[in-house]
Image (cartoon, rainbow, N blue to C red):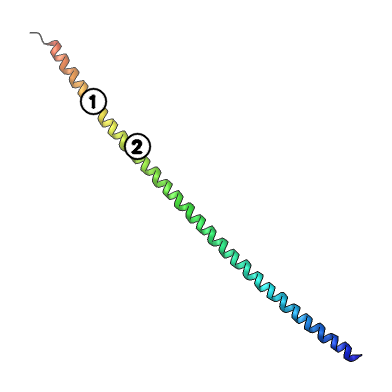
Amino acid sequence: MLLIFESQNLNNNKQTTIMKKVILGLAIVLGLAVVSCKETTKEKTQDAVESAADDVENAAEDVGEAFENTANEAGEAIDTAAEDAGEAINNAAEDTKEALKVD
């Protein structure tokens, strides 16, 4: 009877040891999977943040260029209008002089 009991204890100890190894192995595998998923997620998040930052920078540059182009065009339009107004004033002055001349 003692031999049967000791035999069962050995079998239970072997099974317990095997179960412990299996559970420990699964825990290690799951731990590695979680860690590697977190790294991938961090990398993807970092890539997304960098991409968004690049997009914002590009948009800011585009807006700056648009403002510069608009300012240049407005400046050119003002210059043209000033030249046209100057010519019109000169023409009006000449016309007035001619109209006032008495021969």
Percent position of residue 81, x then y: 27, 27
Percent position of residue 82, x then y: 25, 28
Q: Please state the total of marks drawn on the protein image.
A: 2
Q: Is residue 102 above or below residue 60?
A: above
Q: In terms of depth relative to the viewer, which is nearer, 19 or 77?
A: 19
Q: In terms of depth relative to the viewer, which is nearer, 97 or 3?
A: 3
Amino acid on which disc 2 is placed: Thr
According to the picture, the residue beneath numbered tag 1 turns out to be 84
Q: Is residue 96 above or below residue 30?
A: above
Q: Is residue 28 above or below residue 81?
A: below
Disc on the earlier residue, 1 or 2: 2
Quadrant, the N terminus: bottom right
Q: Are marks 1 and 2 in contact (CB under 8 Å)?
A: no
Residue at left 84%, top 85%?
9
Residue at left 39%, top 45%?
62
Q: In terms of depth relative to the viewer, which is nearer, 26 or 60?
A: 26
Residue at left 78%, top 81%?
15
Q: Which mark is residue 70?
A: 2
Quadrant, the C terminus: top left
Percent position of residue 7, x then y: 85, 88
- For numbered disc 2, what is the local secondary structure? helix
Amino acid on which disc 1 is placed: Asp
Q: Residues within 10 Å of mark 1 (few under 14, many from 20)?
A: few
- For numbered disc 1, what is the local secondary structure? helix
**Quarter location, residue 23:** bottom right
Percent position of residue 45, x then y: 54, 58
32 sits left or right of 22 in the view: left
